[in-house]
Amino acid sequence: MPATLEVACTDDGCELDMFEMHYTYDMSDSVGVADFNCPYCGGTDCLEEIEL
């Protein structure tokens, strides 16, 4: 099963709580939360991976 990544936006001004990304098998293992922007506010430094 391809990897998934659950991410929270910690920017106080952002209305997005969390989102989940589903990777394909072709996604490099080195890809992480730092490679993405918040889809709502566009921030990059405010994303944190949610570990269950």
Image (cartoon, rainbow, N blue to C red):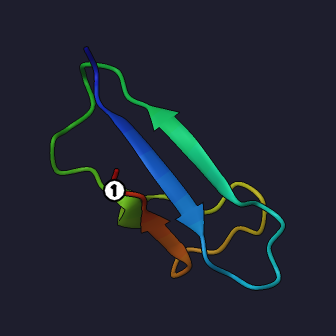
Q: Position of residue 33 (x, y in %)?
A: 39, 60
Q: Is residue 52 above or below residue 9?
A: above
Q: Position of residue 23 (x, y in %)?
A: 38, 28
Q: Position of residue 25 (x, y in %)?
A: 25, 19
- Count of labels shown? 1
- Residue furthest toward the top? 1
In this rendering, would 19 be left or right of 47?
right
Q: Is residue 22 above or below residue 19?
A: above
Quarter holding residue 40: bottom right
Quarter holding residue 26: top left
- Residue visible at 53% across and 40% down in the picture: 20
Q: Say what amino acid the circle numbered 1 marks.
A: Glu
Label 1 sits on a secondary structure element that is loop
Residue density around tag 1, few if under 14, some if 14–19, many if 20 or more, within 10 Å: few
In this rendering, would 30 be left or right of 19?
left
In this rendering, would 45 be left or right of 13?
left
- Residue visible at 70% across and 54% down in the picture: 39
Name the residue beneath numbered marker 1: 51
